[in-house]
Amino acid sequence: MAERILKYLSENDEVNSLKLAEIFNEDHQKVVGALKSIQANGDLVIAEPVSEKNIELTEEGKLVAENGSHEANLYNLVPEEGTPQADLMKLPNAKVGFSKAMSNGWVLVDKSANPPLVKRKVPQIEDLVQEQLKLVASGDHSKLTDKEKADYKKRKLIQEIVVKSFLLKKGPEFSLSLQKLETDLTSDMLTSGSWKNLKFKEYNFDALGAPPSSGFLHPLLKVRAEFRQIFLEMGFKEMDTTNYVESSFWNFDALFQPQQHPARDAHDTFFVSDPQRSDYFPEFYLQKVKTVHSKGGYGSQGYGYNWKLEEAQKNLLRTHTTAVSARVLYKYAQMPRLIRKKNFVPLKLFSIDKVFRNETLDATHLAEFHQVEGVIADYNLTLGDLIGVFAAFFEKIGITQLQFKPAYNPYTEPSMEIFCFHPGLDKWIEIGNSGIFRPEMLLPMGLPEGVVVIAWGLSLERPTMIKYGFNNIRDLVGPKVDLEMVQKSPICRLDKIK
Ligand SMILES: N[C@@H](Cc1ccccc1)C(=O)O
């Protein structure tokens, strides 16, 4: 094809690529493809982009061109003696057909009859609409007046399209043949020095690449990747959240949640039946947790109840990733070198993973979801720091308007619910929960007094639903998910809202 184009140009001064496609009886796209490979060889051909407006038939327009206009079809159905209007109106497209046939003066309504009859007003008609649309179909629309074009456009019978093509002329390096371009620089070419005389194909950085046949990332994973990137940019390290099964001890007790706390109830928590219990706990720490719950300490009076090991041993599907934060903070507190007062190494941690709650399922709730959690430990942190970190974190995901509402968590004091203004939905929505971990949680772990830990958590599903415009969580997670949606969803960018 490329050589045919060059030959044609050697005999003619210029030609449009659309015209060439017609002459060669080939697809225009193929001509353009061949043109690109000629251009890769150098300035053999000059190609000026041309864009022209054209009109073409819509799907409905094609039907009319083939079978006649709605008004003509209606007229043809009206018998000599007339027909009841109600019967006529049952036919497809009768409404448009009738009103056009009336305004063309083709039919009339005889109201003296009962029921009223539609009758022919003229003995014969000419279906100009069909004739003109046939012309458009054959590529000639010069006979249509602007008014007619506007009318057919309004009736959605034709549509305007922009046709892009190229005007081709000989270029300064014009030649009749193409040199084969090298795509690889080989060691042979280097040792023999032949590369000096060879022409190399240019990289096409715009190439789309072969579509992968599998391995598409689900939108949730795309948003997770974006959140992870933000945490990493802000200097956070990722916690290992690979164990979904936790003991009640780490999920609740370590977090100073009393054993009668309603969240432990089977209504909210999925308990594991096999293995039902965990046996190993760091004994020294366990005793401290027991004491702080039952008797208090560190300036707290505790809850004053009889803390039971059996309750703490119960295995469950973790209800929040804060269980992992507790484990990691405890481990950290066991590393004396890192937590020594004068050179305490501050911690910035995050995790994004699944949690499980036995909730009533509805359009926005499932029994499992992902939590995005951030934790910072250092001396002298305040609520102001917590708010400042949020401002920075949420700005990176495009949320700039934040509001906080006092809340209650057994393990944080103070606690704040985080709301953001969503310009798309035009309202304030709750996106997360946060707070400063209580001394009753941190001091039994062995963290030095004075170390403050601020933390927050949000769901991954909510921003994903907002970002991708889902109203029902079942469209995003579960057996009803449309796999094509997964393949077609674009990369998520949590762009800044200006
Ligand atoms: N764990 C809390 C979120 C949270 C994390 C850290 C601090 C405060 C709150 C929840 O499940 O909602």
Image (cartoon, rainbow, N blue to C red):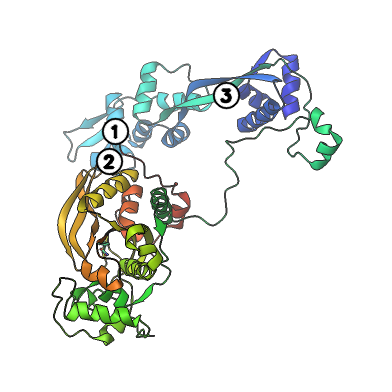
Q: Is residue 193 left or right of residue 490?
A: right
Q: Are marks 3 and 1 in contact (CB under 8 Å)?
A: no
Q: Are marks 2 and 1 in contact (CB under 8 Å)?
A: yes
Q: Which of the labelled discs sits on residue 165, or is there none? A: 3
Q: Bin the neighbour count of mark 3 within 10 Å (Cα to Cα): few under 14, some 14-19, many 20 and up.
A: many
Q: Is residue 456 above or below residue 70?
A: below
Mark 3 to mark 2: distance in Å?
A: 46 Å
Q: Earlier in the sequence, mark 3 or mark 2?
A: 2
Q: Which residue is mark 1?
A: 98
Task: Identify the amino acid type marked 1.
Answer: Phe
Q: Earlier in the sequence, mark 2 or mark 1?
A: 2
Residue shown at the point (43%, 56%) measured from the top left: 221
Is residue 477 in view? no
Identity of the residue furthest to the top in this view? 13
State the image coordinates of residue 110 (x, y, percent, origin top left): 20, 32
Q: Is residue 458 left or right of residue 143?
A: left
Q: Which residue is mark 2?
A: 89
Q: Which of the labelled discs sits on residue 125, or is there none? A: none
Q: Earlier in the sequence, mark 3 or mark 1?
A: 1
Quadrant for the N terminus in the image: top right
Quadrant for the C terminus in the image: top left
Q: Is mark 3 within 8 Å of ligand 1?
A: no
Task: Identify the amino acid type marked 2.
Answer: Met
Q: Bin the neighbour count of mark 2 within 10 Å (Cα to Cα): few under 14, some 14-19, many 20 and up.
A: some
Q: Is residue 223 above or below residue 72?
A: below
Looking at the rendered structure, the secondary structure element under dot 3 is strand
User: In what quadrant does ligand 1 lie?
Assistant: bottom left
